[in-house]
Amino acid sequence: MGTSTVESMTNKSKVDKYSHHDYYGVDDLLSEDHLLARDAVRDWVKQEVSPIIEAYSEKGECPTHLFKGLADIGAFGPSLPTKYGGGGMDEIAYGVIMQELERGDSGIRSMASVQGSLVMYPIYRYASEEQKMKWLPKLGSGEFIGCFGLTEPDHGSNPSGMVTNIKDDGDAYILNGAKMWITNSPVADIAVVWAKDEEGQIRGMVVEKGMKGFSTPEIHGKWSLRASITGELVFEDVRVPKENVFPDIRGLKGPLSCLSKARYGIAWGAIGAALDCYDSALRYSQERVQFGKPIGQFQLTQKKLAEMITEITKAQLLAWRLGSLANDGKASPSQISMAKRNNVAMALDIAREARQIHGGMGITNEYPCMRHMMNLETVLTYEGTHDIHLLITGYDVTGLNAFS
Ligand code: TGC
Ligand code: FAD
């Protein structure tokens, strides 16, 4: 991937002026370890992401050199055991790390959530000990990059309809089909792939780069998540050794359990994007003068800012409570779904309002709001669309399943 043009466009002297916003003292609910993790990732984002992200986004290129740095700051699998390449921290630490990464850019958080929650987590949860030791340390250190293949061209919201399949062939399975919209696929060393066996059961497996018949074409033309690389996974009679197939998991609950882990991270991550937009809008409202006054003095601007910090505060409390439940092993998939939906929609609304406060300047790359807004359109859609999450809550509260 050529990055030289982008690198020449980056402005290392651009200062990230982000300051801390904690209206309800949520920091008091965090431990010293949580605060240390958060501040370390915040510093890393200020140094490594903020100076370059507008240029990479504009160019539509993924800053792949950041994979190593993400590994070094412990962003891959923060709550997985250290023995398996994770950070050995709790679920709230994982959450605050995702928040800080997405404060930088949703695409950077995606790089980390796919690697940690959608590649390392299924291997940790469903692979044999031998499979774990083969892949997890290399994924945790960033030596290997992974991707997660569930969505297909004709099966997005309804993955149970997938047609990608495996057929028994002695010591291997023959894999055929295609996956679509796969974050990191063109740069991945391995792909965690979900496919149906001859009994129609969904199985999980690791497909390795270089296997004959396996290709990963890049998807171009995205107006959203432009600093994240997205592609397909195409399988044409790929021979996947049986030793690459997860032994004990059958059915849709395999991939869906991984989604719960990643959706949890997004519920926190979206707060970061919202905070960045709010922070920029607040500062702009104090500096920009119209009609002889800072625009922050106008009641309509204050209404916007007051509503933004209120919604951010509610989202922070929702995420913190979800994190406490997750630490006790009590966060249900429906509770995670609610937080993902609410917090992403909240962030998208705030990005739009913040963009308005910046007036014309809001559409430029001088300010982060438009980039966050465009990114959040993807975040609203992936890991289950906003409407699918409404239906998950609807099912949970009524007991009536809209999907069947
Ligand atoms: P349903 O019958 O409800 O469930 C099948 C089995 O799965 C269990 N289950 C879950 N388990 C763990 N976590 C969850 N979140 C779970 N949701 C369901 C369920 O209990 C059942 O278990 P069992 O033992 O009875 O078999 O399945 P359904 O076919 O009716 O589908 C339900 C629906 C629509 C909610 C589900 O298919 C869904 O969530 N669809 C959305 C698809 C989606 O989110 N795709 C995401 C693809 S990956 C991605 O976007 C990565 S973006 C990465 C990045 O860049 O950050
Ligand atoms: P569809 O399922 O076709 O939905 C279209 C519209 O119909 C949506 O508004 C949806 O809410 C609505 N709809 C569908 N069913 C219903 C219903 N029953 N009731 C009401 N409304 C309904 N997938 C992966 O597997 N791995 C990845 O790494 C990954 N990364 C992604 C990265 C990007 C940039 C994007 C855009 C997507 C990514 N995805 C990934 C795929 C993502 O999860 C899907 O796009 C998402 O699940 C929606 O599927 P779809 O795009 O096919 O939309």
Image (spheres, helix red, strand yellow):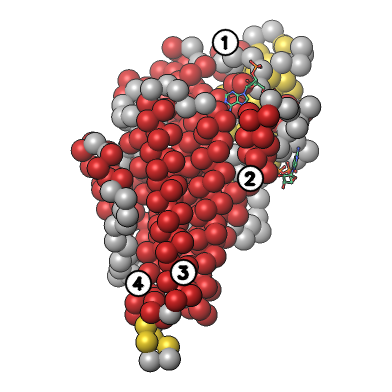
Local packing at callout 3 (Cα closer than 10 Å; few below 14, some 14-19, many 20+) is: few
Mark 1 / mark 3, whichever is N-terminal: 1
Q: Secondary structure at mark 4?
A: helix
Local packing at callout 4 (Cα closer than 10 Å; few below 14, some 14-19, many 20+) is: some
Nearest the viewer among 342 and 41 is 342
Q: How many marks?
A: 4
Q: Secondary structure at mark 2?
A: helix
- Whether residue 382 is visible to the viewer of this picture, yes or no, is yes
Measured Cα–Cα span from mark 3 to mark 2: 26 Å
**Which is in the foreground here, disc 1 or disc 3?**
3
**Which is in the foreground here, disc 3 or disc 2?**
3
- Residue bearing the label numbered 2: 386
- Residue bearing the label numbered 4: 283
Figure quadrant of residue 394: top right
Answer whether labels 1 and 2 touch (C-beta < 8 Å): no
Local packing at callout 1 (Cα closer than 10 Å; few below 14, some 14-19, many 20+) is: few
Measured Cα–Cα span from mark 1 to mark 2: 31 Å
Instruction: Work out whether 51 lies above or below 397.
Output: below
Question: Cβ of disc 2 within 8 Å of ligand 2?
Answer: yes
Instruction: Work out whether 176 lies above or below 69.
Output: above
- Residue bearing the label numbered 3: 303
Mark 1 / mark 4, whichever is N-terminal: 1
Amino acid at circle 3: Lys
- Residue bearing the label numbered 1: 248
